[in-house]
Amino acid sequence: MLQQLFSPSLLHALDLIGIFVFAISGALLAVRKNLDAFGIAVLAEATALGGGLFRDVVIGAVPPAAFTDLGYFVTPLLAVVLVFFLHPHVERIQNAVNFFDAAGLGLFCVVGTSKAYDYGLGLTASACLGLVTAVGGGVLRDVLANEVPSLLRWDRDLYAVPAMVGATMVALCIHFDALNAFTSSLAVITAFVLRLLALRYHWRAPRAWQRRSTAREEE
């Protein structure tokens, strides 16, 4: 569907940019975990491609794009080389990395939802796969690094929620036959801005309500 709204070359370029930034986040975590060069490459590839691979396998888009387009595989390796040799400098531009990561999040949740719908899934399932496309790689990264996934931790700024909003906007636009270049771009921007605001103001999801026990008062 998005291929009808945007040129394939533009979508491919945006895909590679998002993959590159996601790969940087995976490589940086690997460096912090003191992994070797192979470990850095594995985490970078998993972070960059994990969500899209899962989506493509679920919807039957096989072989996945990551295995048919060499650019999808090579781009994370470029991020690995960058982080391997320049990770202290990359750490210092973390704000820039977060900026592009938020942009990738917005793009992937929209592309994932649209692609899932094109392959015959319902709107709800499509939105769910849009979310998975955006955050699945990060979950796989954290699991491989033996950490609780960031999107499940209360002390991390909202990550999945902006992607959920973007994917839901796309699903609603499809339902009302209103998906076009403007509305799809609006969904990307909305998810992007929400993620940046969450980083800026440290927005976090609420935890379970901790109601004060009355047991002592009754004793």
Image (tube, helix red, strand yellow):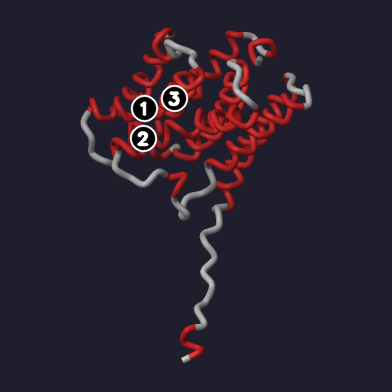
The front one of 132 and 101 is: 132
Task: Using a 10 Å C-alpha cutoff, classify the residue at mark 1 as few (fewer than 14 neighbours), some (14 to 19) or many (20 or more).
Answer: many
Q: Residue furthest bottom?
A: 219
In the picture of the structure, the residue carrying the numbered disc 3 is: 54
The front one of 174 and 204 is: 174
Three-letter code, disc 1: Ala
Asked which secondary structure carries label 1, the reply is helix
Q: Earlier in the sequence, mark 1 or mark 2?
A: 1
Q: Earlier in the sequence, mark 2 or mark 3?
A: 3
Q: Residue at x 54, y 53 (%)?
A: 204
Residue at mark 1 to residue at mark 2: CA–CA distance: 6 Å
Q: Residue at x 60, y 12 (%)?
A: 10
Residue at mark 1 to residue at mark 3: CA–CA distance: 11 Å
Three-letter code, disc 3: Phe
In the picture of the structure, the residue carrying the numbered disc 1 is: 46
The spot of residue 179 in percent (x, y) is 74, 22
**In terms of image quadrants, where is residue 145?**
top left
Q: Earlier in the sequence, mark 1 or mark 3?
A: 1
Three-letter code, disc 2: Arg
Q: Is residue 7 above or below residue 92?
A: above
Q: Is residue 72 above or below residue 184?
A: above
Tell me whether the residue at label 2 lies in contact with that at label 3, contact meaning CB atoms closer than 8 angstroms. Answer: no
**In terms of image quadrants, where is residue 49?**
top left
In the picture of the structure, the residue carrying the numbered disc 2 is: 141
The spot of residue 45 in percent (x, y) is 36, 24
Left or right, 106 with respect to 60, comes to right
The spot of residue 104 in percent (x, y) is 53, 28
